[in-house]
Amino acid sequence: MRLLVAEDDPGLRSVLERALRRNGYVVDAVADGDRALVHLGSYDYDAVVLDWRMPGVSGVEVVRQVRRRGTQVPILMLTARDATADRVEGLDAGADDYLVKPFQLAELLARLRALQRRPMVALDPVLRAGDIVLDPATREVCRDGEPLALTGREFAILELLCRRRPAVVGRRALAVHVWDDEAEAVGSNTIDVHLTRLRSKLTGSSAHIETVRGVGYRLVAPPPPPPPPPVPEGEG
């Protein structure tokens, strides 16, 4: 999943960038609100971590402008401003959550996972496709109840295909959400290599990755079985 981090403190920005990448995210990091707005107008992010106080356009103004555009990307605001009035201002501007500095990285990661589970983006906490069960929180995948060993890139590809199912995901969308340098991924056979390996690991599953020529890829899986009929009263 691709995140935007906007934080003017270079030390904190570097720490966040490294920690989020270690936890499987693709991260774009910027130092001010102006560049945050440019990135938000260019990329489709899964969530944004946004500092309140930044040079130029403030974090809260970035939120207002993004919401005026109609963009519903989940936004987590970071700030040292912990007064109730400040929290109300940030949330009323359109932020989804609020974390006061200093904070623990574990809490930041938990809040990001919670934002991805919000009904606003229609996400189940656990993703299912046929006999594949993928848990974004624990980064575990099971096939028919058995653990499936995936690399970080393979996990990210499968997660994106699960989230977008049954829609087709284009090569550029895969590159943007899974690789830091999307141009390098699109311009080489990197995507094909990872898809081939992932397909091999899904062998025997009821779910498979289908190529839509000239468009992209989609995850195909049978619908879940219907629930059993109710037992008539007095029976069973």
Image (cartoon, helix red, strand yellow):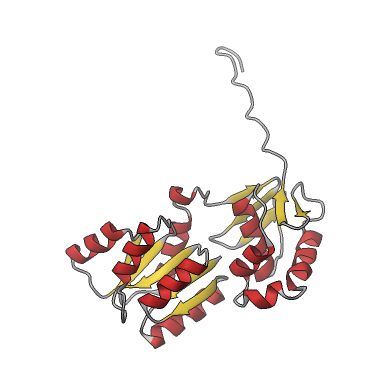
Percent position (x, y) of residue 136? 56, 59
| Residue at the limit of the structure toward the top, as seen here | 234
Place of residue 30 in the rendered image (x, y in percent of width and height, measured from the top left): 44, 79
In the image: residue 154, left or right of residue 33:
right
In percent of the image, x 32 and y 71: which residue is there?
59
Asked which quadrant contains residue 181, the reply is bottom right
Seen in the image, is 153 located left or right of residue 96? right
Q: Is residue 129 above or below residue 48?
A: above
* Residue 206 in sight: yes
Residue 138 sits in quarter: bottom right
Q: Quadrant of residue 55?
A: bottom left
Q: Residue at x 52, y 50 (%)?
A: 123
Instruction: Locate the C terminus by quadrant.
Output: top right
At x 62%, y 60%, the residue is 140
Residue 156 appears in the picture as rendered: no
In the figure, 202 relative to 34: above or below?
A: above
Q: Which residue, as the protein is rendered here, is positioned at the far bottom?
A: 11
Q: Position of residue 27 (x, y in %)?
A: 52, 74
| On-image quarter of the N terminus | bottom right
Please state the horizontal and vertical placement of residue 210, each as a whole percent of the image: 77, 53
Q: Nearer the viewer, residue 16 or 161?
A: 161
